[in-house]
Image (cartoon, grey):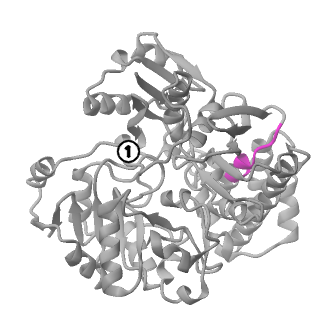
């Protein structure tokens, strides 16, 4: 067995991952360390991530058995940190291996990757079965359009540009704002047809090519003509962009199904599948048995995908497996946390789950810091903020505390054995452990949990919490259920607006000091002012 370092760097969302003896050992994104969101910080390398990985794991990059980069690769950087001893894997191949081999899926499975373009393609499609992958489609960037381009450049145009000519809202960072407000809009035939001129689909082809420049032109023209002047205007545009995306991609999925009717399991990776509403529509197709979205679906997940690719090549990973959690970052001991806390004038008590559950039930806003930090875009119980889900006023309170916009719905965590009674359809529950798709909320629950459902379409993006996989996170949720009768909590990412999710105890203590949260649980202790 061997040690494998994987890298993605030199574009956006750089990261580093380590697999040792066929097991994921460490993963971290550069933005967690630079404290600058990847969408605001293009063309950087994973310099700080490499240092963090070596320090925490004790394994130098040059001492690993293998070093592999997902393309596109900045070779000057790669040569420097590896002593010119490294290899490469295709961008979309790394996406696909990350998705399929962490899906746990047995039998016939289709794996699809889709984004704004790797080194040469925007999409790849694989037929997979029993640990084997067979590439059946590859869509070149030069001759295919990309839905991801349409989302990215629409986002850049919507709020206009700053003095440096950069979008106020940025691609690879703010597309979720459009998706979040889309359900508040309505169908507009004119806007839908305009969007259809920059991206369309027929016979396994997304067309025309050059969707990035075409979308930029269309978005800037619409901005200048007042299409984005009001909140309602932006919501209507977003609704039609979401609808077109769903219409085109579902046509593509159905065409695949007609060719391969025995393949009823689907795996996805790539930036497009950060769109949890699209994922929901796919999951609701009658012929689909289950879908799985790679938790670090964007380019940040490529370093782990590259590691997995190499481990498969070496025979150290032979079939898909399930992830217990995504807590692959640096963790801290109680003693280390206590040492840091001395720099702050804080009180401390021993953690008691019943006491904290009662505090949340009374309206307290709690910071939750446990284990290694999550790998990927979601806070999943390592760096989270927990709040009761029962008050619609929670939106305003949290947005004020976190300095966030009111366009993004907050998401619930839910006890695994209660999910079926609250959300539909009841499938693809494994991928929902990572908060990667939306579900419809059953009618009797809508008024009970208004803080965690979208106000217009009443959907939610739940994270299923499993007692065996994440016992401490399950325990606090279960204690809240025993007190309140509500088997859900609001879980939002532990960060203020426009900042990456927090990484270390210092950042958590600063949030407590600034009043972002009321109490802070780090490992086995509760801190408060």
Picture coordinates of residue 118, whole percent (x, y): 66, 33
Q: Can you identify the residue that label 1 sits on?
A: 32
* Quarter where residue 54 is shown: top left
Image quarter where the N terminus lies is: top left
* Quarter where residue 477 is shown: bottom left
Magenta residues, as a range? 144-151
What secondary structure do most residues of the magenta stretch adopt? Answer: helix
Please state if 280 lies on the left or on the right of 418 as rendered. Answer: right
* Quarter where residue 488 is shown: bottom left
Q: Is residue 146 magenta?
A: yes
Please state if 244 lies on the left or on the right of 524 as rendered. Answer: right
- Mark 1 surroundings: few (<14), some (14-19) or many (≥20) residues within 10 A: many
Residue under the image location 42 percent in, 51 percent down: 324
Comparing 402 with 285, the one in front is 285
Q: Is residue 64 above or below residue 339?
A: above
Residue 9 can be seen, yes or no: no
Picture coordinates of residue 483, whole percent (x, y): 30, 85
Residue 245 can be seen, yes or no: yes
Picture coordinates of residue 56, whole percent (x, y): 26, 34
Picture coordinates of residue 129, whole percent (x, y): 68, 39
């Amino acid at each position: 067995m061997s040690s494998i370092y994987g890298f993605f760097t030199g574009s956006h969302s750089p990261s580093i991952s380590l697999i040792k003896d066929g097991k994921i050992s460490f993963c971290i994104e550069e933005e967690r360390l630079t404290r600058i969101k990847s969408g605001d910080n293009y063309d950087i390398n994973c310099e700080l991530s490499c240092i963090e990985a070596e320090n925490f794991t004790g394994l130098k990059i040059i001492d690993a058995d293998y070093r592999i980069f997902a393309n596109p690769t900045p070779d000057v950087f790669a040569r420097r940190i590896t002593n010119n001893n490294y290899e490469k894997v295709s961008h979309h191949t790394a996406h696909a291996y990350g998705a399929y081999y962490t899906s746990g899926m047995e039998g016939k499975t289709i794996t699809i990757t889709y984004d704004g373009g790797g080194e040469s393609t925007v999409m790849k499609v694989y037929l997979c079965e029993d640990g084997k992958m067979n590439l059946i489609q590859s869509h070149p960037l030069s001759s295919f359009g990309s839905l991801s381009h349409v989302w990215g450049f629409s986002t850049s145009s919507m709020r206009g540009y700053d003095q440096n000519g950069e979008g106020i809202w940025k691609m690879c960072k703010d597309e979720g704002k459009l998706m979040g407000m889309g359900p508040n809009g309505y169908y507009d035939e004119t806007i839908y047809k305009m969007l259809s001129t920059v991206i369309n689909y027929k016979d396994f082809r997304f067309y025309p090519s050059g969707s990035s420049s075409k979308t930029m032109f269309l978005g800037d023209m619409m901005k200048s003509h007042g299409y984005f002047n009001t909140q309602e205007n932006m919501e209507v545009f977003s609704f039609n962009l979401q609808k077109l995306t769903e219409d085109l991609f579902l046509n593509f999925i159905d065409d695949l199904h007609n060719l391969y009717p025995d393949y009823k399991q689907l795996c996805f990776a790539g930036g497009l599948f950060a769109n949890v509403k699209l994922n929901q529509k796919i999951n609701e197709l009658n012929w689909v048995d289950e879908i799985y979205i790679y938790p670090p679906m964007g380019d940040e997940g490529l370093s782990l995908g590259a590691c997995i690719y190499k481990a498969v090549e070496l025979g150290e990973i032979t079939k898909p497996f399930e992830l217990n959690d995504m807590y692959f970052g640096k963790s801290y001991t109680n003693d280390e946390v206590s040492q840091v806390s001395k720099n702050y004038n804080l009180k401390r008590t021993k953690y008691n789950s019943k006491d904290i559950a009662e505090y949340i039930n009374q309206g307290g806003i709690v910071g939750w810091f446990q284990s290694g930090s999550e790998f990927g875009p979601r806070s999943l119980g390592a760096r989270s903020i927990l709040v009761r889900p029962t008050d619609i006023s929670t939106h305003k309170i949290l947005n004020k505390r976190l300095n966030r916009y009111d366009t993004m719905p907050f998401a619930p965590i839910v006890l695994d054995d209660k999910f079926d009674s609250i959300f539909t359809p009841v499938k693809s529950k494994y991928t929902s452990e990572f908060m990667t798709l939306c579900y419809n909320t059953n009618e009797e629950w809508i008024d009970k949990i208004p803080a965690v459902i979208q106000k217009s379409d009443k959907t939610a993006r739940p994270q299923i919490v499993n007692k065996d996989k994440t016992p401490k996170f399950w325990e606090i949720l279960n204690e809240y259920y025993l007190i309140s009768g509500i088997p859900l909590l609001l879980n939002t990412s532990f960060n203020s607006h426009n900042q990456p999710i927090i990484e270390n105890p210092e950042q958590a203590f600063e949030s407590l000091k600034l009043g972002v949260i009321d109490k802070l649980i780090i490992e086995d202790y509760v801190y408060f002012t």
